[in-house]
Amino acid sequence: MIAILDIGKTNKKCFVFDEDYRIVFEKTTQLPETTDEGGDTCEDVNLLRQWVERAVLDILEDERWQIRAVNVTTYGASFVYLDAAGHLLTPLYNYLKPFPENLKKQFSDTYGGEAKIARETASPVLGNLNSGLQLYALKHLKPLVFNQIKYALHLPQYISYLMHSVLHESGGDSKPPRDHARTPNQSGGDFKSPPDYADHAVSEITSIGCHTMLWDFQNNDYHEWVKMEGMTEKFPPLVSANVVSYPEQRPGIHCGAGLHDSSAALIPYLACFDEPFVLISTGTWCISLNPFNQEPLTAEELEKDCLCYMTYEGKPVKAARYFGGNEHEKCIIGLARQFNKPLDYYKTVAYNEGLIAGFRNESAIRSSDVYPFEDYETAYHFVVAKIFKDQYHSTKLVLTKTTQRIFVDGGFSKNEIYMTLLAKAFPKLEVCAAEVAQATALGAAIAMHARWNEKPLPQNLISLKKSKG
């Protein structure tokens, strides 16, 4: 069996999967936020650390589970800074904090302009969402803290670091040799094997390569600006996510390096489907991911919020982001207030072609705080048509001539209006609502399959429902 921690900004989940990838244990927790020294809300990293340690110990001590591996997937764009003794140096800053304009200009002037760096690192200019810029800001605003940094760890790798410590401290006396398996990257080279450090701090490619402005996608290395700023010495050795190691005192239990959640959610689809597809992962963000499109990003695509993610094997994934789930959430609150309906009333609204026909003209689809319709059903069709218009243009940015299918997972996969519009918009493609039980956690488990599971991958990991246009 394998234990997985799946850490989102709101929900912290722990799972146990059996060898058939059935969830045999699941527990969800929400932790209160705190504030940083500037008064901005952020994750309480000390509370998170305590939750991780307790969750791992509870699973290991439960006699029902024979755990052979542990791994973690978390949200990205978040750094944890540790000193040489492993102590936290700063809060876990929120990536939504405004980025200082003077530093933004300084960075741009020093390194040849934002457009150049954005193109080379496949990262739209997003301020603190470019986690490399968080480290840049720390160096220039708090040099004394920067100089104390032994390791700058993205959040998945910090949690892996913690899990390794728990396994080490809670185990027996035997010390098997560490597993130094190597995984080739896309250029034919090798990521480094896990280090011989007692703390097992590592960097990992799905975190380093995800809109961080750290990774040069053309040269397959840290970008030159990262080296010139002396930041690479703050990063532990870079490993692939399926490179794992034994903690010294827990014989037989593999510990994974951790995964960025968007890359983890893609793994079940790559494991189950060979033909070219696009996955629209819908939540607060609606992200169209095409792992079969590895063309370099253009300046126009970057301006339209395209970026590249990385698979856990180090291959680029062209993606386009749209804040569709957030837009939907704001709209249904307004609709509920205007029409005096429950907040989830939209779930009862079925697709009506007659209502949609009135919104065919894009010029008729405009944002509004008060919807000029007499009933909720018409207004909700208007909302989804407006959201879908932007979703269509976003998804088109990553499609290729070879694309055969579009999969949709997350909240919009259950939305009949959205799915019907998608199928009508792409009549030559097979459009399917996909249902995967806990896709990010499942992906983190599959990434380590060979290390803990002797059975072949099941064929029924993903259920599909084809949508008709």
Image: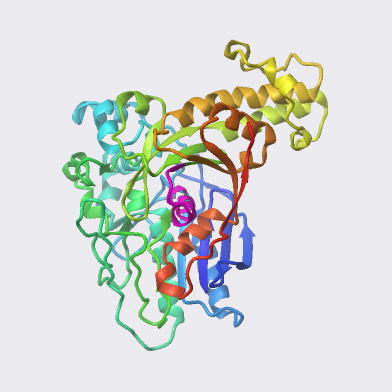
In the image: residue 181, left or right of residue 35: left
The foreground one among 463 and 4 is 463
The foreground one among 42 and 386 is 386
In magenta stretch: residue 263: yes
407 to 124, vertically: above or below: below
Magenta-colored segment: predominant secondary structure: helix
Residue 20 shows in this picture: yes
| Residue 69 image position (x, y, % from top left) | 45, 72
Residue ID at (46%, 73%): 453
In the image: residue 134, left or right of residue 380: left
**Magenta segment, which residues?**
262-277
Color theme of the render: rainbow
Residue ID at (56%, 70%): 20
In magenta stretch: residue 221: no
| Residue 75 image position (x, y, % from top left) | 47, 49
Residue ID at (32%, 40%): 294
Q: Quadrant of residue 343?
A: top right
Q: Quadrant of the C terminus?
A: top right
The foreground one among 321 and 28 is 321
In the image: residue 360, left or right of residue 247: right
409 to 387, vertically: above or below: below
Residue ID at (54%, 62%): 459
